[in-house]
Amino acid sequence: MIVITNAHGQQRPIYAIRTDAAGDITESKTGIAWTVDRSGTYMQTPLLADGLGYFCLDNGVLSVYRLTSGERVYQQRLGDGKSGFTSSPVAAGNRLYLTSEEGRTYVLALGAEYKVLAENEVGETVMATPAISDGVLYVRGRKHLFAVGTK
């Protein structure tokens, strides 16, 4: 499945396109597995993991869809709705990490159930997507680079 998202205009669609689609698929629709209007992300790249797609909007509303059908599994606002979300979600070790522009990282369990495992703050603005390498989560804030891991 190829997932395309767009937040320009009022439609803000998500398209799931079959990998065997060929030619102009706009007319026949046979190459498009499913679509969802008004859920596409703008700056953030959605995360696809274990048959689910995680789409976090600028306002912190996280929607999770089954990649096979487009069925929405859950939708939940992260935080109080006052902070923006520019960075993309990342995942490691069955955990999903979503970081707000105010520097709060929401740690969720990957899967079909909304479960917050932790919330952590770095104390400064974060606009960049965190990176994960060798068990360490790297978060670039406005003034500092934070490395979070176990010894």
Image (spheres, rainbow, N blue to C red):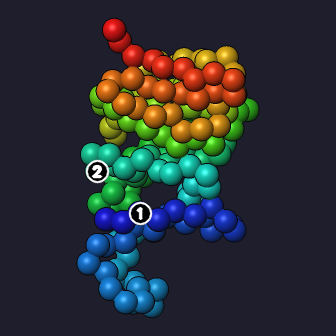
Considering the numbered disc 1 on the image, is that residue within a helix, a strand or a loop? strand
Question: In which quadrant of the rendered view does residue 67 lie?
Answer: bottom left
Q: Considering depth in this image, is 151 or 110 the residue closer to the camera?
A: 151
- The answer to whether residue 114 of the structure is visible from this angle is no
Q: Quadrant of the N terminus?
A: bottom left
Position above or below: 127 against 38? above
CA gap, disc 1 to disc 2?
A: 12 Å
Position above or below: 117 against 9? above
The label shown at residue 51 is 2
Outermost residue toward the top?
151
The label shown at residue 12 is none
Q: Residue at x 47, y 65 (%)?
A: 4
Describe residue 89's horizontal placement relative to residue 52 as left or right: right
Single out the mark in the foreground, 1 or 2. 1
Q: Considering depth in this image, is 94 or 63 the residue closer to the camera?
A: 94
Q: Residue at x 50, y 34 (%)?
A: 130
Can you give x and y, in whole percent of width and height, for residue 88 in the image? 52, 43
How crowded pointer 1 is (Cα within 10 Å; few <14, some 14-19, many 20+) is rated as: some
Position above or below: 118 against 41? above
Residue that mark 1 sits on? 3
At label 2, which amino acid type do we have?
A: Gly
Can you give x and y, in whole percent of width and height, for residue 65 in the image? 40, 52
**Which of pointers 1 and 2 lies earlier in the amino acid sequence?**
1
Q: Residue at x 33, y 24 (%)?
A: 135
At label 1, which amino acid type do we have?
A: Val
Q: Quadrant of the C terminus?
A: top left
Can you give x and y, in whole percent of width and height, for residue 112 in the image? 34, 40
Can you give x and y, in whole percent of width and height, for residue 8 in the image? 67, 65
Question: In which quadrant of the rendered view does residue 42 lie?
Answer: bottom right
- The answer to whether residue 56 of the structure is visible from this angle is yes
Question: In which quadrant of the rendered view does residue 30 lie?
Answer: bottom left
